[in-house]
Amino acid sequence: MILSNHFWQKHDEAVFERIKTFKSKKNEVWLIKARKSDGTPQQYVLKAYQDHKRLVKEMEMITALHRQGLEVPAVYEQQGSYLLMEYIDGITLCEAFEKQECKWTEGDHLPESTMEIIGLLTGWLERFYQITKELEGKRMIMADVNLRNFLWTDTVFGVDFEDCREGRYEEDAGKICAYVYTYSPMATPFKKQLVNAFADTFVKELLLEGSLIYHYMDRELKMMERRRKMAIPHFK
């Protein structure tokens, strides 16, 4: 089909089919199902890249992070513009927070489950920063920290590393806060509390500068307004 038979024969898997398309602005990403010769199904993620350099960059980063034990998908096969990876059966952090907001009552504290996810993501980021600094010799950030790029199972997985680059950790933190604030419906009381909880946790656990987090959040919100051509309520 798209890939050669090498991978499927190696793993005793004869055929595969696309069963779902994932949302992606930069590439085409599918959930595919392979069926072994004994009939046992197995699922994978197949990603088609527009830019081969970005494929190589992401493949090398994921492979290095996986070797260091960070929660990222395993890379199984690369051919041409395609990358075959492990499928992580979870929901995005965006979906997780949406479900929690539906159950939340204004005036209440954030649920313990919400604070647990914030802690898990913060811990994941701390390890990502430590590992990449050791590997690259400089402070690397994810840059694309859309919460759809993080999956929640019983822990947190990161799944998109094409935009990794050198930068300040507060930039990632500020962007996360901006995304949290603007997920539909934007600027709700729940999301305002969520932003502050994220910022407080980043300051406490990652030792980041709170004023810089809100600076980068404000910068990202202004960029969102230009991209989306719409007004975003000022964060107070």
Image (spheres, grey):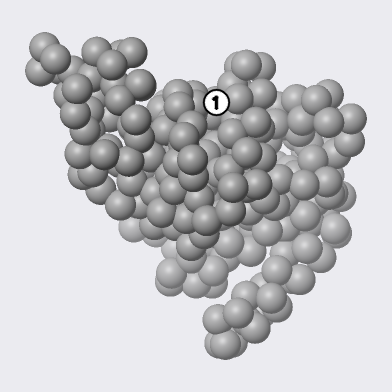
Quadrant of the image containing the C terminus: bottom right
Q: Position of residue 202 (x, y in %)?
A: 73, 43
The reply, left or right, for residue 215 in relation to residue 51 is right
In the image, what residue occupies the spot 45% across and 24% down?
76
Can residue 61 be seen by looking at this rendering? yes
The reply, left or right, for residue 44 in relation to residue 205 is left
199 relative to 86, above or below: below
Under mark 1, the amino acid is Glu
Q: Quadrant of residue 55?
A: top right
116 and 216: which one is in front? 216
Name the residue carrying label 1: 71
Q: Residues within 10 Å of mark 1 (few under 14, many from 20)?
A: many
48 relative to 228, above or below: above
In the image, what residue occupies the spot 76% across and 71% down?
219
The reply, left or right, for residue 117 in relation to residue 153 is right
Q: Position of residue 228 (x, y in %)?
A: 55, 81
65 and 216: which one is in front? 65
Considering the numbered disc 1 on the image, is that residue within a helix, a strand or a loop? loop
Quadrant of the image containing the N terminus: top left
Circle count? 1
236 and 178: which one is in front? 178
Q: Position of residue 27 (x, y in %)?
A: 47, 55
In the image, what residue occupies the spot 33% across and 13% down?
10
Q: Position of residue 72 (x, y in %)?
A: 53, 29
The reply, left or right, for residue 185 in relation to residue 131 is left
